[in-house]
């Protein structure tokens, strides 16, 4: 199973930047897509960005042009650079990873515990 640990959250003012990191560990055959999701109070969890093994990326419209997702496959890390933060970006941010324990097994999804991002106006 893959364990994910996020870091880098915090309290910032609108317009500032934060960089989230997520480290994957455990015993697995491969990690495929990785991503970031967020959940604001009273709202459902939503996609922020995803990145494939070959670094193809996908972003929510609300963060395009402000957030950048990247990954280091050698270190099993995924990052989220968040610029020009807005109060509506306030949420708990979760890292996700799709992985296989063996070549023949089906793909599973693991989630981190989340890291809080608060953007004050």
Image (cartoon, grey):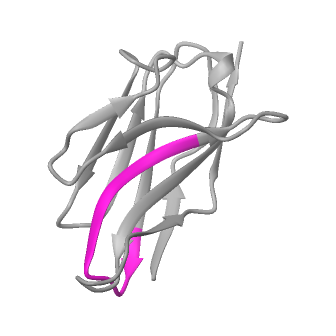
Q: Which secondary structure type mostly characterizes the magenta part of the structure? A: strand
Q: From the top left corner, tell me how far across and down residue 87 is, in percent.
A: 68, 18
Q: Tell me the residue at 73%/38% (across/down).
A: 44
* Relative vertical location of residue 9 with respect to residue 91 in this rendering, above or below: below
Specify the segment rendered in magenta. 24-37
Residue 26 inside the magenta-drawn segment: yes
Nearer to the camera, 20 or 73: 73
* Relative vertical location of residue 51 with respect to residue 97 in this rendering, above or below: above
Q: From the top left corner, tell me how far across and down residue 15 is, in percent.
A: 53, 13
Q: From the top left corner, tell me how far across and down residue 61 is, in percent.
A: 46, 17
Q: Quadrant of residue 99?
A: bottom left
**91 sits to left or right of 9:** right
Q: From the top left corner, tell me how far across and down residue 29 is, in percent.
A: 25, 81
* Labels in figure, total: 0
Q: Quadrant of residue 57?
A: top left
**3 sits to left or right of 89:** left
Nearer to the camera, 119 or 89: 89
Nearer to the camera, 14 or 115: 115
Quadrant, the N terminus = bottom left
Q: Tell me the residue at 37%/42% (across/down).
A: 50
Q: Tell me the residue at 25%/49% (across/down).
A: 52
Quadrant, the C terminus = top right
């Amino acid at each position: 199973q893959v364990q994910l640990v996020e870091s880098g959250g915090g309290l910032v003012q609108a317009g500032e930047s934060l960089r989230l990191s997520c480290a994957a560990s455990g015993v697995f055959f491969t990690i495929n897509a990785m991503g970031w999701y967020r959940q604001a109070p009273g709202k459902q969890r939503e996609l922020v960005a995803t990145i494939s093994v070959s670094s193809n990326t996908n972003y929510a419209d609300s963060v395009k042009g402000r957030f950048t997702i990247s990954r280091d496959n050698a270190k099993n890390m995924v990052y989220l650079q968040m610029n020009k933060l807005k109060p509506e970006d306030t949420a708990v941010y979760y890292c996700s990873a799709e992985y296989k324990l063996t070549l023949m097994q089906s793909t599973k999804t693991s989630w981190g515990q989340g890291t809080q991002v608060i953007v004050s106006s």
